Image (cartoon, rainbow, N blue to C red):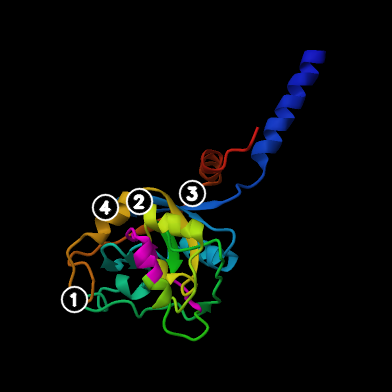
């Protein structure tokens, strides 16, 4: 009887552990250059929820990575890019939208390190994000000297925190974008996909000479929990 009671408690504990929702939502981007998996940040709920909404609708499927700059970033999500008329070879892309913007969600802890997912935007004074276009940072490594120069020029005196400096020096990124564009996720697997796309041949508008379409899907609840367990193991 005691063994049955102990087993019942164990089963209830395991059920409770796996019954709740995952802590994070992950998405998969598939291209001919491979796949990458990204975690959407809970610290930026407006951007997270909007990306989830569009992905559920299949909005991104068939859109292109229409702007790529090696050692900087790859950009996609323009709805015009899946229009065969507007996206003819050589046509400039990047002006398509969904009719709304998203308020900026700048967080001191979120910065443009290599592999982050961020929202594109036009030159609006509130720095509100595009409702659909995004980019993934490839970035490059910086020295302290180059970061000092950046602080005094493009960052207009804003100091880069010491711990972020270490990321920019060792892993790389695009620090001049910090606090100007909302970061709302990061690649957790498949960063080589970004590197391959960033290196393709392109035209004078930075559009790849050969189209790079994508499909975007939400990972299942089970898959998200598995990744949570790998990336954020609970302390024993």
Q: Are marks 2 and 4 in contact (CB under 8 Å)?
A: no
User: Please, what secondary structure does the residue beneath circle 1 have?
Assistant: loop
Would you call the spot at circle 3 few (<14 residues within 10 Å), some (14-19), or many (20 or more)?
some
Q: Say which residue label 4 marks.
A: 33
Verify whether residue 144 appears in magenta.
Answer: yes
- Quickly name the residue at label 3: 219
Does the stretch in magenta take in 234?
Answer: no
Q: Dot 4 lies on which element?
A: loop
Q: In this view, does 122 lie above or below 186?
A: below
First in sequence, mark 2 or 4: give its number. 4
Residue 85: x percent and y percent? Answer: 25, 78
Q: Residue 124: x percent and y percent?
A: 47, 85
Residue 114 shows in this picture:
no
What secondary structure is marked by label 3?
A: loop
Q: At x 77% / y 14%, what residue is drawn?
A: 3
Q: Which label lies toward us, 4 or 1?
A: 1
Which stretch appears magenta? 128-148
Of marks 2 and 3, the one in the foreground: 2
**Secondary-structure class at tag 2:** helix
User: Which of label 1 and label 3 is nearer to you?
Assistant: 1
Q: Distance between the residues labelled 1 and 2?
A: 25 Å
The Cα–Cα distance between marks 4 and 3, rounded to whole angstroms, is: 19 Å
Residue 173, percent from left and from top: 38, 61
Dot in front, 4 or 3: 4
Mark 4 and mark 1 lie on one chain; the one further toward the N terminus is 4
Q: Position of residue 212 (x, y in %)?
A: 26, 62
**In front of the other: label 2 or label 4?**
2
Q: Mark 1 sits on what residue?
A: 204
Residue 152, label in figure: none
Disc ID at residue 191: 2
Residue 48 lies left or right of residue 216; in this view the side is right
**First along the sequence among labels 1 and 3:** 1
């Amino acid at each position: 009887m005691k063994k049955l009671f102990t087993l019942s408690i164990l089963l209830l504990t395991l059920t409770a552990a796996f019954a709740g929702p995952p802590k994070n939502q992950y998405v998969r981007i598939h291209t001919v250059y491979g796949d990458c998996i990204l975690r959407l940040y809970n610290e930026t709920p407006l951007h997270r929820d909007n990306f989830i909404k569009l992905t559920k609708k299949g909005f991104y499927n068939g859109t292109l990575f229409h702007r790529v700059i090696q050692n900087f970033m790859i950009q996609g999500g323009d709805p015009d890019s899946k229009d065969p008329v507007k996206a003819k070879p050589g046509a400039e892309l990047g002006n398509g939208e969904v009719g709304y913007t998203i308020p900026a969600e700048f967080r001191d802890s979120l910065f443009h390190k290599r592999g982050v997912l961020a929202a594109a935007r036009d030159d609006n004074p509130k720095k509100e994000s595009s409702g659909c276009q995004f980019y993934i940072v490839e970035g490059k490594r910086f020295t302290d000297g180059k970061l000092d120069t950046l602080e005094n020029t493009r960052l207009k005196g804003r100091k880069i925190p010491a711990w972020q400096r270490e990321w920019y020096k060792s892993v790389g990124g695009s620090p001049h974008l910090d606090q100007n564009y909302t970061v709302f996720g990061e690649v957790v697997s498949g960063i080589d996909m970004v590197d391959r796309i960033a290196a393709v041949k392109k035209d004078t508008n930075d559009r790849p000479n050969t189209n790079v379409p994508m499909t975007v899907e939400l990972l299942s609840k089970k898959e998200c929990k598995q990744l949570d367990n790998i990336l954020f193991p609970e302390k024993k």
